[in-house]
Image: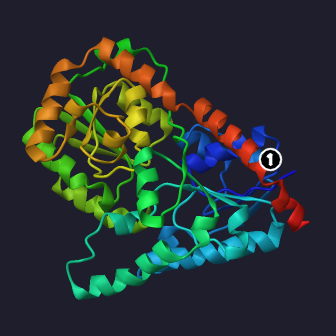
């Protein structure tokens, strides 16, 4: 029996399910225990009975409002040690954000890396003044030069991120695409009843790195379209969300922290997804929208480009280009295209993720049985 803790939300929850199917005893370290009612409502999955022990971690909204990236690294190290002391697992699976892995545990650790640099760092300009440079330099040194991550086994979410890991850490990794929500409602509902070909939606967390300002700017230019923005928000980002609302045109509606059923109803009446994150590491929202029959419009970067997830004609380089892509998507959407998008999205289903992760873990455990024997 192997004890494996997992971090993370979407990938983490589905990883727990895959581990449970392998008969692996699991101890979880996370910012909140995944209670059945909440995870079913938000993600559509129940893993409560799969967890044999729990260590509470500190969330981003619970840390002090300064030196955030450093606090996250420090906390990750001590929670790693706390998990070890509490349950003494044989192996570790990390599916969340930045983490410092104790060097003595690195060979016993598998890390699902969403991106080699913290999202806050990768999406902000830290070269504009001397104080920002001073703030970020030590973090970059720590994250790029310590050997802890290089001794761990790395899984990642896309070829785009795989190349970034190689460039940043000079480390190899294995791509296992993340599990993406899949829908089965009749696509004909999108052209009947409340269906509206002039509805554009977005999916994602309301956080500055996602560049929602681009969507609001586009909405003002296309006042005859409806824009429905679906996303979650944490307490530390509420001021950003309020700023977005204050600057939004009348044709923009915000749907905050909605249930999976509410989200599905919005997707049913939408035909285009507008995605504004530049350098998207993978894009679960992009695949989810495809499964709901939406044409995705994304920036010409990240996995959308490098992993060929989004076609050339629907990737934009600048504002005017984004307007052209949107107009084209609105004009050519039909049921046939929606069906093809849904079929493509099935390549990134939960079933495929579980199958690929389980095969990877079984092989890894088989090849690393000596680590467990050394521990005992």
Q: In which quarter of the view is residue 221 placed?
A: top left
Q: Identify the image's colour scheme: rainbow, by chain, secondary structure or one colour.
A: rainbow
Question: In the displayed structure, does residue 124 sit left or right of residue 53?
Answer: left
Mark 1 burial class by Cα count in 10 Å: few <14, some 14-19, many 20+:
few
Identity of the residue drawn at 41% across and 57% down? 164
Question: In the displayed structure, does residue 370 sit left or right of residue 208?
Answer: right
Identity of the residue drawn at 37% across and 25% down? 268
Question: In the displayed structure, does residue 107 sit left or right of residue 245?
Answer: right
* The C terminus lies in quadrant: bottom right
Q: Residue furthest right?
A: 376
Question: Where does the image place residue 118, in percent across and percent down from the top left?
Answer: 43, 66
| Res 232 seen here | no
Identity of the residue drawn at 67% across and 42% down? 360
Question: What residue is shown with label 1?
Answer: 366
Question: In the displayed structure, does residue 326 sit left or right of residue 102?
Answer: left
**Helix, strand or loop at disc 1?**
helix
Question: Where does the image place residue 43, in percent across and percent down from the top left?
Answer: 55, 41
Q: In which quarter of the view is residue 343 placed?
A: top left
Identity of the residue drawn at 65% across and 52% down? 34
- Looking at the image, is 249 positioned above or below residue 118? above
| Res 154 seen here | yes
């Amino acid at each position: 029996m192997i004890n494996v803790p997992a971090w993370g939300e979407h990938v983490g929850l589905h990883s727990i399910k895959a581990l449970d199917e392998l008969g692996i005893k699991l101890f979880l370290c996370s910012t909140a225990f995944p209670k059945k009612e909440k995870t079913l409502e938000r993600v559509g999955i129940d893993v409560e009975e799969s967890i044999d022990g729990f260590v509470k971690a500190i969330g981003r909204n619970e840390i002090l409002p300064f030196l955030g990236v450093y606090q996250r690294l420090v906390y990750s190290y001590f929670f790693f040690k706390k998990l070890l002391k509490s349950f003494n697992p044989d192996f570790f699976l990390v599916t969340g954000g930045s983490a410092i892995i104790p060097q003595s545990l690195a060979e016993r650790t598998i890390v699902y890396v969403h991106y080699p640099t913290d999202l806050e760092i990768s999406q902000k300009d830290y070269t504009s003044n001397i104080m920002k440079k001073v703030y970020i330099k030590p973090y970059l040194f720590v994250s790029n030069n310590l050997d802890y991550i290089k001794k761990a086994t790395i899984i990642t979410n896309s070829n785009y991120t795989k190349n970034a890991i190689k460039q940043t850490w000079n480390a190899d990794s294995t791509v296992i695409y993340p599990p993406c929500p899949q829908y089965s409602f009749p696509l004909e509902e999108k052209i009947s009843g409340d269906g509206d070909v002039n509805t554009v939606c977005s999916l994602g967390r309301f956080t500055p790195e996602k560049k929602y300002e681009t969507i609001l700017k586009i909405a003002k230019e296309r006042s005859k379209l409806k824009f429905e923005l679906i996303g979650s928000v944490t307490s530390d980002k509420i001021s950003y969300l309020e700023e977005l609302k204050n600057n939004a045109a009348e044709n923009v509606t915000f749907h905050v922290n909605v249930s999976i059923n509410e989200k599905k109803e919005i997707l049913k009446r939408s035909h285009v997804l507008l995605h504004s994150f530049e350098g998207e590491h993978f894009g679960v929202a992009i695949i989810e929208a495809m499964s709901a029959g939406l044409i995705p419009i994304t920036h010409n970067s990240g996995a959308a480009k490098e992993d060929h997830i989004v076609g050339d004609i629907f990737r934009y380089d600048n504002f005017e280009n984004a307007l052209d892509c949107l107009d084209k998507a609105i004009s050519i959407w039909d049921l046939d295209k929606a069906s093809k998008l849904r079929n493509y999205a099935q390549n990134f289903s939960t079933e495929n993720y579980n199958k690929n992760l389980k095969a990877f873990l079984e092989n890894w455990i088989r090849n690393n049985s000596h680590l467990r024997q050394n521990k005992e």
